Image (cartoon, rainbow, N blue to C red):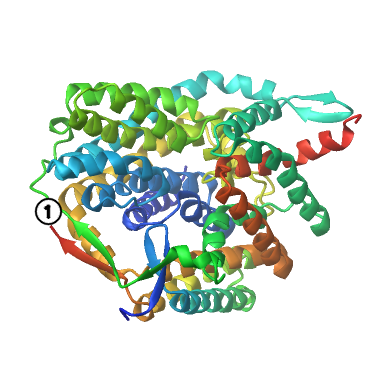
Amino acid sequence: MKDEVYYELYGEYISPRELGISTLISAVFAMLFFFTAPSLAQITGVQPGGLSITLGAIGASVGFAISTLIAKVKRVVVEV
Amino acid sequence: MDPATLILMLALSALSTILYIFIGILPGTDETATMAPIALTLLLIGLDPLVVLAWFMASIAAFKMADSIPVALAGIPGGVMAVPQVPDALVAKDYGLADTVLRKGIAASVVGQVVALAVTLSLSYYLMPAGDWLRTTDVVFGVKVARWFWLVLAGLIVLALTSRSKFVALVSIPSLALLIQGLRSVYGRPIFISLFLGITIGPMLFELLTMLHRDLRQSLARRGLKEVKLVRIGEISLNPLKILSREELAHSTLWSAVTSILATVMSPVGLTILIGDLLRESRKDKIRGAVLAYTVRDAIKNATYVGGTLIPLLVIGVPTGPMAAGPAAPFFQKLESLGATPRDVIVSNYSYPTIVAVLLLATAISFLIAYPILVKYSRRITLAVFRRIPAEALYGLFIAIVLMLSYYDAKVSGIFGTLVVSIVSGALWKLGVSLGVLFMTLVAAPTLVQLLSALPL
């Protein structure tokens, strides 16, 4: 990992490959959850618009949780 | 307000506080990109707009208190608003005063938000009748123009003239307005969400796209891991009155009151830089100047966010400054699910005392949670966040939320609309145009383009 080239963005070192994977995971989960809303709305009888956004945000958060396990932290904390 | 809504408001204020402590400590988290999409999501879900405003007020309290923690401990800003504090913190760190600025910053945040709430809520009450006058329309070149438009236009020009690149900023106003209205005419309706999100993620997306360009990315390339030096701190008293000196308390109070009003039309980050630099340069002693500037900047951060949101929201009804047109923009846009703007729903459904009580309650809850946590555990939380949260996961999360909201707004063409606006916004930002100019152009675009088309030239 130490030999890989990273790119600095807002003071953070970024791996384009890991960023691509993290974005893909969060986006896929967000849209998958988003599109399940209409059928769930039919069953529960709630507004599909609001439910779509709620489920999409939950999906994106699930993607975030998975991404924290896949992407590596590029900070080395030195306590001085 | 019924008991269920009240309980929901209290719970969401607490949840917002916890969430924004972490977001605040994380480096590179832009305020608009992290606050606006979540507030917008909550409004689109169908939550009561006043409950979402309570969430938003709690997020300001926690975010603006937490984003200076990594500045004091490691010289790394937790958000854009904390960037001006970096030079002050580095001076303090060199003299072994990291824990001093850390605790003074936390206490000053409380002062800033409380003073701003007292000033803006009192002022708004007396200024509310002026809102009707500002919303009245006049006919100019055959175009109906609301009077608030001139306030927005004046603010836009001032912001453009204070941008790093004045000429580009000035010429970008009509150009971006034409792009926005052009896209709206293609969509056939006055869409807002995807255009707003495009500006919000513009700087981040432009930097990410730069990483894909072989030549441009060379200047950003780094090898190895990023070393972050975290200083040790001693025990800090929980009593905020023991933390600030009389001079720091007086300056924090005075400048919080002044900047909370100025933020109605001026940039919060601009005010934080301006007042902090003036105070630093006014002291001959370098260390005293740095500590005073750091402390007062922390108060101004909270004050400008509160004032920049509440005066336009309660008095004017339209976003007249970069704060209202940026992080707080979701409250000013008509949402199909509500049939009105969240702002209109709040002021027409609730009495002024109820709105005041909710805002004070949300702030109190946020500080009751954030203050002891940050005073006691700020170093431990910073260590955990720095060691466990990869930046890629966080960027991935926000890009995914933006994609979903853009699709919700205008299907697949909404995603590409967001992309084109974000590339243009990112390029203009890179060229030295402040983001406030871009957000306020989005507000002014419909009238501005109508006036441009009607000009007899």
* Chain identifier of the residue bearing label 1 in the image: B
Q: Position of residue B399 (x, y in %)?
A: 53, 66
Q: Position of residue B189 (x, y in %)?
A: 79, 53
**Residue found 18% across the figure and 32% down from its top:** B287
**Residue found 35% across the figure and 34% down from its top:** B113
Quadrant into which the C terminus of chain B falls: top right
Closest to the observer, B193 or B28: B28
Query: Can residue B46 be spotted in the picture?
Result: no
Query: In the picture provided, is B3 more to the left or to the right than B412?
Result: left
Amino acid under disc 1: Arg
Query: Can residue A30 be spotted in the picture?
Result: yes
Query: In the picture provided, is A33 more to the left or to the right than B115?
Result: right
Q: Position of residue B432 (x, y in %)?
A: 56, 44
Closest to the observer, B71 or B107: B71
**Residue B151's quadrant in the figure?**
top right
Residue lying farthest right?
B456
**Residue found 12% across the figure and 57% down from its top:** A80
Secondary structure under tag 1 reads loop
Q: Residues within 10 Å of mark 1 (few under 14, many from 20)?
A: few
Instruction: Give the number of callouts.
Output: 1
Vertical side of B1 occupied by B189: above or below: below
Vertical side of B457 occupied by B128: above or below: above
Closest to the observer, B359 or B373: B373
Per the image, the residue denoted by label 1 is: B232
Vertical side of B278 occupied by B167: above or below: below
**Residue B87's quadrant in the figure?**
top left
**Residue found 18% across the figure and 44% down from its top:** B93
